Image: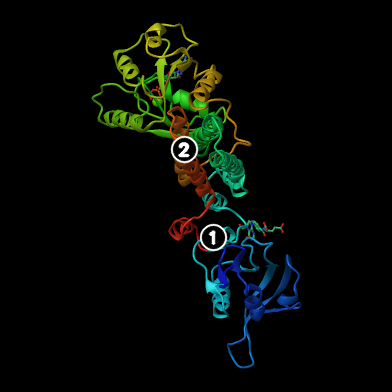
Amino acid sequence: MNEDTIAAIATALGEGSIAVVRVSGPDAVDTVAKVLKSKTDLREAPSHTVQYGWIVDREQGQDQELVLDEVLVTVMKGPRSFTAEDVVEVSTHGGIVAVKSVLELILRSGARMAEPGEFTKRAFLNGRIDLAQAEAVIDLIRSKSDRAFQMARKQAEGALSKMIFPMRQKLIELLAHVEVNIDYPEHDVDNVSADLIREQCTETLAQVEKLLNQANEGKILREGIMTVIVGRPNAGKSSLLNALARENKAIVTDIPGTTRDIVEESVALAGIPLRLLDTAGIRETSDKVEQIGVERSHTALVEAELILLVLNHHEPLHEDERKLLAQLKDRPTIVVVNKIDLPGELDVSEVERDYPKERIVSLSAKEGEGIEALELAVSSLFFSGKVEAGDMTYVSNARHIALLYETKRSLKDAIQATYEGIPIDLIQIDIAASWESLGQILGDAAGDSLLDQIFSQFCLGK
Ligand SMILES: Nc1nc2c(c(=O)[nH]1)N(C=O)[C@@H](CNc1ccc(C(=O)N[C@@H](CCC(=O)O)C(=O)O)cc1)CN2
Ligand SMILES: Nc1nc2c(ncn2[C@@H]2O[C@H](COP(=O)(O)OP(=O)(O)OP(=O)(O)O)[C@@H](O)[C@H]2O)c(=O)[nH]1
Ligand SMILES: [Mg+2]
């Protein structure tokens, strides 16, 4: 347990109705009791209760005391608290003046200023949460969407840890089993061990790979897919954006070259968030403004994670479209054959030579027909199965993903070694390594520098 009692402002600095100073550590109650005037002495207050009172600076004059603010004070006795230590929270009036003066007084009364993330770090060091949970707290604060927040919240509650834990348990049991066989060598024991290792490591490897696949899907669900709509002028790119956005966001006219600059809109397609970029139609042009637009279309393509190449069903394939089809065939491209409400002039078989059928979608942006087919094509391109947002655990933290890759490598090495007749005690090293890298996700034996690096990313007071 920590000796120090720490304090910091836990709320954002700015105008607001209330602000909170959080104090944690063995002297939290005493420190605040010294500066609080209330009916019940804070030292006598039961845990998880709120006291009304005033924060007073008694050291100001001789007899007179200076009232800093009228407050509500919450006491949470350890280990039933966020840090697992005694925690006292002082709710002051909002704005920065009251809360700052209360914090300063508390610091003068014996507490030390907390470092960024130190409250959460203590929750980790005191064993209330593991490192993966602590890291999820940062993601929680930083999340910008409901979905991102819900993913982080579940991890903060230990969803990932609950999956890692049994995997590690299985590996340690395997190690124990193999160890016993080595210590009491009988005939053919090595073969039995090799079979056992192969079986268990293959099972764990499948779980690790599943987590890694889901990590990628989770990233898509949190951040959205950068989607670029390209095609010739008048193909109906802006109409497609409007149809997907269900509003007239981009200007649509029958004049080729209408869109000059990139128009951006976020939409959800079959539950998948897309960051849609409508671009200027690609063609040779002498118009200076349009040229810049076409240039921007090409630039957008470079970074696109999904490309919707819009063709016009009502016209034969144009040379510029042949070029685009060839250029984009190895990219994540879906060919959208638009204007199917009009008579067909386009020879789709030419497209089908380079693109599989499930990557070609026919629709009418104007009539809003065939959008479901596009939804299907997008979700099968990015998701192995159904898009689940509800109860899946998505690994989002870069450190965790790197450690899962390390685990994967060790498990693969172990499996490979069983086929090559490598001595069991050498294979044990790989198994132990995979057990360790999984443990590092939870913060097993994490060194000071790693902890410093992780917790310094937090804001003050968290
Ligand atoms: N005022 C206030 N609001 C807050 C927080 C806080 O610290 N203070 N939180 C901070 O992020 C979040 C809530 N998170 C919390 C997580 C655990 C515990 C806690 O005391 N856990 C104990 C005992 C719980 C119990 O009595 O059953 C434990 O898990 O042992 C408190 C807050 C959001 N709202
Ligand atoms: N019949 C029919 N007309 C369409 C359809 N989609 C678009 N159009 C029409 O085609 C014309 C061009 O549509 P836009 O959406 O502006 O085409 P664009 O690809 O954005 O064109 P630029 O911005 O010039 O590159 C407009 O007159 C639209 O109404 C469709 O599905 N069916
Ligand atoms: Mg347009």
**In the displayed structure, does residue 254 sit left or right of residue 371?**
left
**Could you tell me if the residues under marks 1 and 2 are in contact, i.e. CB atoms within 8 Å?**
no
Task: Work out whether 151 lies above or below 103.
Answer: above
Q: Is residue 326 visible?
A: yes
Q: Can the viewer see residue 276 in this picture?
A: no
Residue 121: image tag: 1
- Disc 2 crowd rating (10 Å Cα; few below 14, some 14-19, many 20+) is many
Q: Which residue is mark 2?
A: 427
| Picture coordinates of residue 363, whole percent (x, y) | 50, 16
Q: Quick one: 428 or 184, which is closer to the camera?
A: 184
Above or below: residue 159 compared with residue 452 = above
The residue sitting at 57% across, 30% down in the picture is 271
Q: Is 159 situated above or below 141?
A: above
Residue appearing at x 51%, y 50% in the figure:
142
Considering the numbered disc 2 on the image, is that residue within a helix, a strand or a loop?
helix
Q: Nearer the viewer, residue 187 or 214?
A: 187
Amino acid type indicated by mark 2: Ile
Q: Quadrant of ligand 3?
A: top left
Farthest-out residue, left: 286
**Which color scheme did the rendering employ for the protein?**
rainbow
Q: In the image, residue 356 lies at what x, y percent?
A: 43, 13
Residues under labels 1 and 2: Cα distance? 36 Å
Q: Is residue 83 above or below residue 329?
A: below
Q: Which mark is residue 413?
A: none
Q: Amino acid at mark 1?
A: Lys
Q: Secondary structure at mark 1?
A: helix
